[in-house]
Image (cartoon, rainbow, N blue to C red):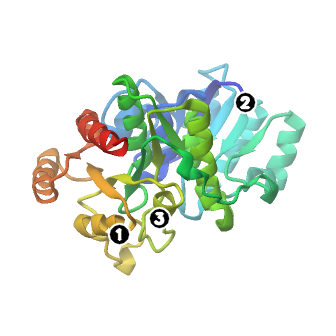
């Protein structure tokens, strides 16, 4: 698929964690050029301001048709949200049909596959456009079992994990990827979700669309292939969900099957319960307790990254100062300060790895 101009639809969700696919694409993608956002709640505003208060000169339109009236060379419409259960919002379907009529290919990262929606599939066939369902599972013949070849990888592997889902793990991993490469550390990132593929990272797989028997093998295959083909100084792994999220625990596979012996842990100080399950009052673990659990898997936490969704900067700063003093490891807020402060602990870990 050639790189082309794209619209991203979020209809009413742009300022929420559900629009994390759109957020990621606005921050970075080498696969697409993002021309505009479709969101009927924020029409006429700058998408960057809605996302995190920083202008990015990407305009928001009410509909696909209104965006196409201003942008004549659009090739793709991207579904820019990640919903609970991966279901397609009903409000998106008419917009998808309008995009098909305009000969736009549709890129879908949800579990609700466009190729299984009869009307949309028929329209796409008649229009001779692609319905790209990224999360559609691979055939068993295309999957890999774990063999132990991970131990042939001779560079440090760092996993970016979190205490919960929808914390910004992929964004932090992307920032670290850029920062390390800009400082002379040849770094590759293993994507494990649909947004990472959309952003154009070369190596990875879709974690939650992989048959459970083969998750360990797909992790191993992605890392080993990356190491063999790129010969990097460092490999980063994008984490998924969290070690203790009851709706979809994930992370131990990266530590065990992926042999990641170092972790950068993303936390959200303002969260009390697991995201989306506040009514069940399932408490998040403390940061210290999560570090202990990671240690039990044979890995060390070399830094903490902080996601901020509601706290004022001064409140966040105070929490970070206390956290850093108590844990005695660096604590940074990537969206506020970037991740340059993590260059030192990454270099220090890499030096220990090679001893």
Q: Which residue is mark 1?
A: 296
The residue tagged 2 is 1
Q: CA distance from mark 3 to mark 2?
A: 33 Å
Nearer the observer, 20 or 346: 346
- Specify which label sits upstream in the sequence, 3 or 2: 2
On screen, residue 156 versus residue 191, left or right, reads left
**Camera-side residue of 204 and 53:** 204
Frontmost residue, 194 versus 116: 194
Vertically, is 239 above or below 196? below
Identify the disc placed on residue 252. Answer: 3
Nearer the observer, disc 1 or disc 3? Answer: 1
Q: Secondary structure at mark 2?
A: loop
What secondary structure is found at the residue carrying circle 3?
A: helix
Reading the chain from its start, which is encountered first: label 1 or label 3?
A: 3
Q: Residue at x 65, y 67 (%)?
A: 212
Helix or strand or loop: what does disc 1 sit on? Answer: helix
Residue name at image x 40 percent, y 27 percent: 181
Q: Earlier in the sequence, mark 1 or mark 2?
A: 2
Nearest to the eye among marks 3 and 2: give it.
3
Residue nearest the observer in this picture, 273 or 160:
160
């Amino acid at each position: 698929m050639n790189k082309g101009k794209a619209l991203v639809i979020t209809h009413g969700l742009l300022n929420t964690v559900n629009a994390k696919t759109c957020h990621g694409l606005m921050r970075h993608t080498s696969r697409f050029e993002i021309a505009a956002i479709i969101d009927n709640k924020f029409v006429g505003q700058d998408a960057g301001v809605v996302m995190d208060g920083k202008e990015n000169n990407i305009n928001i339109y009410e509909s696909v048709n209104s965006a196409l009236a201003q942008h004549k060379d659009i090739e793709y419409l991207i579904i820019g949200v990640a919903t609970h259960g991966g279901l397609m919002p009903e409000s998106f379907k008419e917009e998808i049909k309008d995009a098909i009529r305009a000969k736009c290919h549709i890129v879908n990262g949800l579990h609700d596959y466009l190729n299984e929606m009869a009307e949309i599939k028929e329209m796409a066939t008649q229009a001779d456009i692609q319905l790209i369902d990224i999360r559609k599972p691979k055939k068993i013949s295309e999957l890999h079992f774990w063999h132990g070849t991970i131990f042939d990888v001779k560079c440090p592997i760092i996993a970016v994990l979190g205490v919960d889902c929808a914390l910004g793990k992929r964004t932090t991993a992307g920032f670290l990827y850029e920062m390390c490469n800009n400082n002379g550390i040849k770094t590759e990132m293993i994507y494990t979700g649909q947004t990472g593929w959309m952003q154009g990272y070369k190596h990875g797989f879709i974690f939650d669309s992989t048959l459970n028997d083969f998750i360990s093998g797909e992790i191993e295959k992605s890392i080993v292939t990356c190491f063999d083909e790129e010969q990097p100084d460092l490999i980063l792994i994008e984490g998924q969900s969290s070690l203790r999220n009851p709706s979809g625990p994930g992370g131990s596979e990266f530590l065990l099957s992926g042999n990641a012996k170092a972790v950068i842990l993303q936390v959200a100080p303002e969260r009390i319960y697991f995201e989306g399950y506040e009514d069940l009052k399932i408490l998040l673990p403390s940061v210290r307790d999560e570090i202990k659990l990671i240690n039990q898997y044979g890995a060390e936490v070399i830094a903490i990254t902080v996601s901020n969704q509601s706290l004022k900067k001064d409140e966040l700063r105070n929490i970070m100062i206390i956290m850093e003093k108590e844990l005695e490891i660096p604590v940074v807020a990537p969206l506020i300060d970037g991740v340059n402060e993590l260059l030192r602990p990454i270099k220090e870990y890499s030096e220990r790895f090679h001893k």
